[in-house]
Image (cartoon, rainbow, N blue to C red):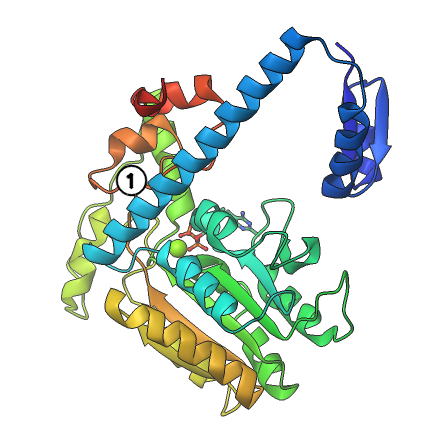
Amino acid sequence: MDILYLSNNTWDIGKNYYGSHAVLGGIRASLEKLNEVMAGLPVTPEQQQARDERNQLLSQLSQQRRQDWDAYLHQAEQAPADGINPALIPHYLAQAITEQGLANQFVYVHEAVSDSPSFQYLMPLNREMSRPVSYYCVSGGSLGWSMPASLGIKKQQTAIQGVTPKLVINAVGDGSSLFYPQVWWTAAKFQLAVLYIITNNREYHTLQNGLEEVIDSYDWEPKKKPVEPNPTDNADYHNYEVDYLSLQHPALNFKQIADAMGAGVQGQVVEQTEDLNAALKAAIAFVLTENKPFVLDIRTARDPAAVQSSANMKASTSPLRRPSLNYFHKDLLDEINPNHFSTLS
Ligand SMILES: Cc1ncc(C[n+]2csc(CCOP(=O)(O)OP(=O)(O)O)c2C)c(N)n1
Ligand SMILES: [Mg+2]
């Protein structure tokens, strides 16, 4: 089989295995051209039928994915667990951006580490609302990139690809935000009106997920530290033995961290699911009209029960499971959840 590489990055092409052709160009634009060329190629009736069936299956799977996500979001709104379901954040942001007519006037900078599927799927990153530069994310796994980057993105006032950064939103995990909280001082000083959203699940959730994989694969787990009497007699500290990878004791308050950066940056803590939509709308209105940064410390559920791996799936105690993004590789999904395709046979 001939393999054709398509990339918008020369280095990516260089590091791949041998392919008979390598094309440098925008992925979407190039695929459209390729589609045109392929549509003009001769095709046998059998090939055509196979194509039609495959396309039909793909669009069916895509619809199924949308339905599953809608059901998940509906449940997340109705039955909040021990905190706000983080998927509701991009869900409401997308509604606000669409309602306020901000197509091609928003940029989303991503570092909400364990919530990537929700933000990538639910933010309005589609042809009508956005362009490739509407979304930024570090391409390696190194944390601490997005908050400083958001300042540079906001400062760039000329449109790139027709996108102006009128509304810059940076969602970042509580752990990741601690790499550069002083960014808020710079944002205040230079009046860079970025909306910062902390997905504050009070832990390094990604590392918890990784640890569960290790436990599952090697049947090994870190020794729990004994509970030591705490001289401060703070009841919180008595949970220490179950506190591995937690950022909870003592608790962090990102509104207070923002307050410490001076008057130019304000913030708010959001704890209740029913307050989230209004808080997001108000924060968007604030950055757009006041031209100042704003920090939302959103207390998200500690276990949104992501279907990232079979180990996660087993470890999860929540009945509410975040759907996958990949509905298109059946073998992979069967391994995670054999019932996934039951409705689609
Ligand atoms: C510079 C750097 N240091 C450490 C890590 C290891 N690391 C990967 S994920 C993670 C936890 C992120 O926690 P948080 O930002 O709260 O996001 P969550 O997973 O809870 O959504 C850490 C510390 C990293 N990727 N990069
Ligand atoms: Mg976290």
Residue 218 occupies quadrant: top left
The image shows residue 51 at horizontal and vertical percentages of: 61, 18
Q: Quadrant of the N terminus?
A: top right
The residue under label 1 is 321
Q: Please tell me in which quarter of the rendered image ligand 2 is found.
A: bottom left
252 vs 32, left or right, is: left
Compared across the picture, whether 218 is left or right of 195 comes to left
Q: Between 286 and 151, which is closer to the camera in this rendering?
A: 286
Residue 252 placement (x, y as % from top left):
35, 69
Residue in front for this viewpoint, 220 or 273:
273
Above or below: residue 187 compared with residue 207: below
* Residue sitting at x 68%, y 56%: 131
In percent of width and height, residue 116 lies at 48, 48
Amino acid type, residue under disc 1 in the picture: Arg
Count of labels in the image: 1
**Left or right, residue 46 beside residue 345:** right
What's the residue at 50%, 56% (across, down)? Answer: 123
Q: Residues within 10 Å of mark 1 (few under 14, many from 20)?
A: some
Q: Position of residue 61 (x, y in %)?
A: 45, 30
Q: Residue at x 60, y 59 (%)?
A: 129
